[in-house]
Image (tube, rainbow, N blue to C red):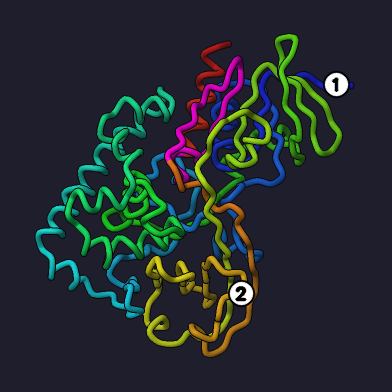
Amino acid sequence: MVRSHESVVIIGGGIAGLACARRLHDRGQSFLVITENLGGRVRSSNDGAVNLGAYYVTRDYEHVNMFVERGRRIRRRPILRGDEDGSFSRSDMPLFLHPAQFVRFNRLIRQFRRRYEAFKKVCRVTSQAQAIRADPLLWELYNEPATDFIQRNQIDDVARHYLSPYAQGTAFAPLEKLTAFTMLVGVLPTIVPIFEYTFRFEDLTEGFDDSIVFDSVTRLTRSDGVHHLHTAGDESLTADNVVVATPVGVSAQLLDLGPLKRPINAHMYLLKGSLRSPWAQASVSLFHEKDDTFAIAQQTGGEILFVSASDHPDFTRYFATWEVVEHHYWNPAFHLDGTALLECDQGAGLFLIGDHNVCTLEDSYITGLFAADRILGGQ
């Protein structure tokens, strides 16, 4: 038995789904959000002090920053970077030993940032997929392996000493698994200020808390001109419009999406203890892609965030003493490996939003705005 009919149902209460809901609410459009939790992969520790999901925001997150309390700035120079020989350094000396490469990289990353910022503005009125295809540079970067980009631009030494640990610490993947586009997004923190943060979900959901139902959609079909949804809680409902805002692996269980990017997994541990040298002397340590460890970040409250590919990391390598306070396994953390490009418009009144094409909080938020505006424009 169908319990209710809704004008709009948003499946998923992560950043994209809530952005869509916020826009619809502000324009007076009714909707229902069905989600297992608020925040999705924006998740904090039990005491709310440390992010155990999306860890940082950048200064130029125009939309997301309206709903966060920015904390400590993660400055570039105190970051300890791992090299392929197992050594660690915070010195930029390897860059200055290859000045021509450094100049080329600096030019490339700044050129990319200008095009990327313009792209985000275009995505407010055009789908991500269409915007990427319409920009010859971004389209090329989206399809080019990062390793080919590095060789083509002759920045091999800069990549080995500099880009590899940044990609490892932000994308949790070696350069060989990334496209040039994803790599460049991941290393933007080398030129754009980044901050730890606390998300103010109460501000983002203000006014529509009663429109959020904690459940999960298990089946989505369309017949007789409407969408039919069934939930794990054994509820059934119909909707004129459906916005699927779940991680793309979950979305693929509801929609026929075709090929997807391959998943990247990560374990996040929150520990108390005493780090060994050299990691004790750095606020943030990033590791080389040959290491199973992605990053270590000392928190202002004294706890330590440890990010790894392993479910049984050798903590004795890094810690003199330790106690695991929390552990969260992100399976997946991202879908980054590959060049699949998915459209927002999935059919009559059916939309796909999130980080499946571009994996940042801000880009995910913008996909939610775009879907909401498509629904509002179709009323």
Q: Which residue shows up at 19% across the image and 57% down it?
A: 155
Q: Where is residue 39 in the image (x, y as percent from the top left)?
A: 61, 47
Q: Mark 1 points at which residue?
A: 2
Q: Name the residue under label 2.
A: 312
Disc 2 crowd rating (10 Å Cα; few below 14, some 14-19, many 20+) is few
Q: Earlier in the sequence, mark 2 or mark 1?
A: 1
The image quarter in which residue 29 lies: top right
Q: Residue furthest right?
A: 1
Q: Looking at numbered disc 1 in the image, what kind of residue is underneath it?
A: Val
Q: Where is residue 187 in the image (x, y as percent from the top left)?
A: 32, 55
Q: Residue furthest left?
A: 100
Q: Position of residue 371 (x, y in %)?
A: 52, 25
Disc 1 crowd rating (10 Å Cα; few below 14, some 14-19, many 20+) is few
Q: Is residue 10 left or right of residue 317?
A: right
Identify the magenta region.
339-363
In this figure, what is the number of numbered marks? Answer: 2
Q: Element under label 2? A: loop
Of the numbered discs in the image, which one, if any, rests on residue 248? none
Q: Residue furthest bottom?
A: 320
